[in-house]
Image (cartoon, rainbow, N blue to C red):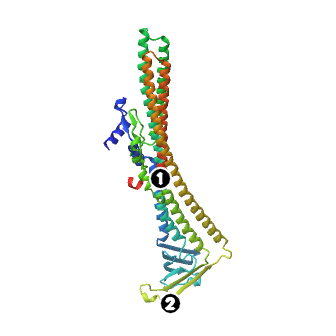
Amino acid sequence: MKHLILGIILFVSGFAKAQENTSVITLEEYLGYVKAYHPIVKQANLVISESEAKLLKARGAFDPKIEVDYNQKTFKNTDYYDKLNATFKIPTWFGIEFKGSFEDNSGAYLNPEATVPTDGLYSAGVSIPVARGLLTNKRMAMLRQSKLYVNQARADRQLLVNQILYDATLVYFNWLKAYNEKLVYEAFLNNAEIRFNGIKQSYEMGDKPAIDTIEARITLNTRKLNLEKSRIKFIKSSLELSNYLWLNNNTPVEIKEGIVPDTNTYITIDTTLNTSDLDIETFDIENHPKLKSLDYKFKSLTIEKRLQRNNLLPQIDLQYNFLSQTPDIARSFNTSTYKSGVNINIPLFLRKERGDLKLANIKLQNTEFEIQNTKISLENKIDAINQELNSYALQNDYTNTIIEDYGKMLTAEERKFFLGESSLFLVNSRESKLIDAKLKAIELENSFFNTKASLFNVLASFDIEAAE
């Protein structure tokens, strides 16, 4: 943690200038900042908030309601009518709705059926769907689906955060590659300077021809040119890395000179990305967030299918209300005074309902196929990446052997040159081969790191809940 704080201070101040005063930011520290403060990671958290808001909205369908309907008409000093109807409704889970109401009507031209006692008329009753809407209805389906959406949103958030971490990791590896290339050119520039100064002194003493100094200077300037190119490349990669670094107050951070990547990333990469052989062996593909998200989607579509199947039934709603002038007396509500009704709605061809059910079945089948395809695809990707990583291990052994042999040849050629048995051209040629081999090794390491990042992205095993 102290090292992390030091890194932030250096980011902001930019005091560290010299190579010996550099501060290293590891991949783990870097990803820690991305997880905690990157705006897209925070944006991914809004997915959860949105799904919870939808759940709250779905629960609102079961909220008790008060409805007041008041109408009055007066014309030429005559009260045509004065009607008040206040209702209190309590919806329940299985489509049944309890209702209590108060009705008070008066007026010279009041419809006779609306006539009520002077003190008004109270009623208490129930509305029951006996076919469509009893066992399942849109209100129930929305609430069930909203609960699934919350879980699906958590899985989707993990995928979103995993993607931004993957992108950030690739940028870090590119930064590390540019830094390693810069180190190579710096090291060989130092060799070229030493060689040029030595040959120049030998020329001044008459031991070497002038052409050797020209060739040594060409090599020196070539090394300077390559170093300058690598320096600019490193600066550009540093600025690209800065896109992923933010502070807690939504302040972007710029990588300053003196902040460098960890050249020992190879040792810690598996621990940081959870991509070791043990992690892969214990990984359960069924717990992959993509499959989890699709599973919640499948369950939601199953609820939709059940609703559409229920809509094939005729709509038959029964209503029964007890009437009373004195609601404070319980026995005043009896079967001798009541208001009842039945509402029947039967589409003759059910084309809309049958079409909705067919579409629900198609969506369900599509999701089922997608689950199967995703599972196979993930398994094959993990297997392919593992084989690629094994190949990189073998390629790395070959590359290290090649570098070691080129180094030995360069050392031998330099010895022969100073003994007068070789030429500067051969020395430069050997050195160029060694530089190329080192750059290829850096490229190979970068490909290895990128493949590890791909494995991290495919596994999507980062637990954002634990990180919070």
Q: Residue furthest left?
A: 2
The residue tagged with tag 2: helix, strand or loop? loop
The spot of residue 410 in percent (x, y) is 45, 25
The spot of residue 229 in percent (x, y) is 49, 28
| Residue at image coords 58%, 69% | 305
The spot of residue 457 in percent (x, y) is 48, 49
Residue 240 visible in the displayed image: no
Q: Which residue is mark 2?
A: 335
Give the mark nearest the N terminus, 2 or 1.
2
Q: Residues within 10 Å of mark 1 (few under 14, many from 20)?
A: many
Q: Residue furthest right?
A: 349
Q: Nearer the viewer, residue 160 or 9?
A: 160
Image quarter (top left, top right, bottom left or bottom right) of the N terminus: top left
Q: Nearer the viewer, residue 307 or 370?
A: 370
**Is 419 placed left or right of 130 in the picture?**
left
Residue 458 visible in the displayed image: yes
Q: Which mark is residue 185?
A: none
The residue tagged with tag 1: helix, strand or loop? helix
Type of the residue with mark 1: Leu
Q: Which mark is residue 459?
A: 1
